[in-house]
Every structure is written in structure tokens, then in C-alpha cells.
Image (spheres, grey):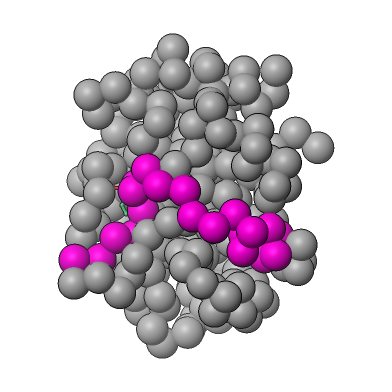
Amino acid sequence: MKPRIKICCISSIQEAKTAVEHGASALGLVAKMPSGPGPIADDLIRDIAQTVPPPVATFLLTSETTADAIIAHQRQVLTNTIQIVDELTDREYRKIREALPAIKLVQVIHVIDERSVDEALELSEQVDALLLDSGNPKLAVKELGGTGRVHNWKLSRQIVHQASIPVFLAGGLNAGNVKEALDQVNPFGLDLCSSVRTDGQLDPVKLEAFFRAVWG
Ligand SMILES: O=C(O)c1ccccc1NCC(=O)[C@H](O)[C@H](O)COP(=O)(O)O
């Protein structure tokens, strides 16, 4: 099956249109974060999400860590998917589902060591998909994505093989390494931000090269 491609860090209606025209099946809209190149204002997330045609998914990337705050955040921006980039400290996934039954939930796992595999498999029971990324939530200034770094794909491969829900691979993917990533990890989808940008703007030439590298 052809891997789905999610283009993240979308920062304007025009970038959303460009990514969809190239074949993106999901767009990432990054809200306030402790670090990283992608955040935009909630009003802009809402404006962009409203222009995206079905069946393209709109992911709100939220750094909120409680169910109540995440529910309130989605209600401000009205995306059809929530990507939780940090730990949901109260583990109240069910509360989010009850409040927002039509909204899909994606949990990010920052793949660091063997414990990340256990964490991923445990949380896979609670959400619709996992996204494996290369951040580090333990740093004084948390890194929750957009690092441009790859992580240990052997661990990601274990998660993909053992989880019973779709898994996206993220972290430092580019046109030059994506074939190897697909061979090693075999994810349902790919997610990327840094490598398809030039001076912070989505670059159609880099986007084209990435899609060509994946789909031929
Ligand atoms: O880009 C950011 O600023 C960011 C900050 C915090 C969480 C997520 C963020 N970006 C969104 C993504 O999910 C990226 O696509 C993902 O981390 C991969 O990024 P990259 O390694 O740059 O391709």
C-alpha cells in the first residue's frame, strides 16, 4: 500500500493548497509550542482548517497535557484530528472521545529507547493512530517536534510491527532517506516539516522531490 503523507508546519492557506495539490492526505497545523519552527496562531489554524477539502485530514498539534485543555483547544480551531505531542498527564483519552466523538486522536511517541516501545503499545489502546517522532520532552525547554533529526528506526520498526493501529513515522525525513525509512520501518504514513522548507516557507520543488521519492 502507498504510504500516506502528512505535511506538517503548514502556515498559510496557500501552503495548505500547495501540499494538497502535491498529494498530501493530511496537514499539520502547529499551535503554541515550547520550541520549534512551526507554531502559528490559533485563529490562523482555524482559518486554514476551514479551507481544506475532504478527505484531507487537518491535524491540530497541541502541547496541552490535560483532557479539558485539549478539548477546549480543539473547539477553538475546529480541526478534524488532534495530535497530542506531549504526555497526556491525566490519561483521560476517554474524556476527550466523549466530548469530541467525531474527532480522531493521534498520540505522538518521542522514540528515545526501549521504554518508548512499551509506551507506544500501551497508548495504542487509547487512540486512532500513533506518530513516532524525535523530540525530547524531558529537556528543560521541551522539544516536541520539528527537530529535523532521525531517531532509532529499529525501535520504530518494532512499534509498527506490534501495534494494531496505523503508525506514522516522523523526524528528519527527506527525499534522500525516505526510501530507507520505508524499507526499515514500513509505516502506514510519513510526516515531515523541515526538509520541504526553504527559509521557513514550504518549497514546491522540495515537496515534489519528496513525493517523487516516495511514490515514484
Ligand atoms: O515544527 C514545530 O515547531 C513543532 C514543534 C512541536 C511539535 C511539533 C512540531 N512540528 C510538527 C511535526 O509534527 C513535524 O512534522 C515532526 O516533528 C517532524 O519534523 P521534522 O523532523 O522537521 O521533519
Q: Does the magenta run of residues contain 148?
A: yes
Rendered position, 198 above or below 90:
above
**Left-right relation of 23 to 151:** right
**Coordinates of residue 185 in the picture (x, y in percent):** 68, 50
Q: Is residue 93 above or below residue 18?
A: below
* Magenta segment, prevailing SS (helix, strand or loop): loop
Residue 84, horizontal then vertical, whole percent: 43, 64
Judge left or right: residue 165 versus residue 122.
right
For the point 52% across and 16% down, the residue is 208
Q: Quadrant of the N terminus?
A: top right
> Residue at 75% of width from left, 33% of height from top?
2
Residue at 49% over, 31% down: 174
Which portion, as a residue range, is magenta?
A: 141-160
Q: Is residue 48 visible to us here?
A: no
Q: Position of residue 14 (x, y in %)?
A: 35, 21
Total marks in image: 0
Residue 112, percent across and down?
A: 47, 68
Image quarter of the C terminus: top right
Residue at image position (29%, 60%) is 143
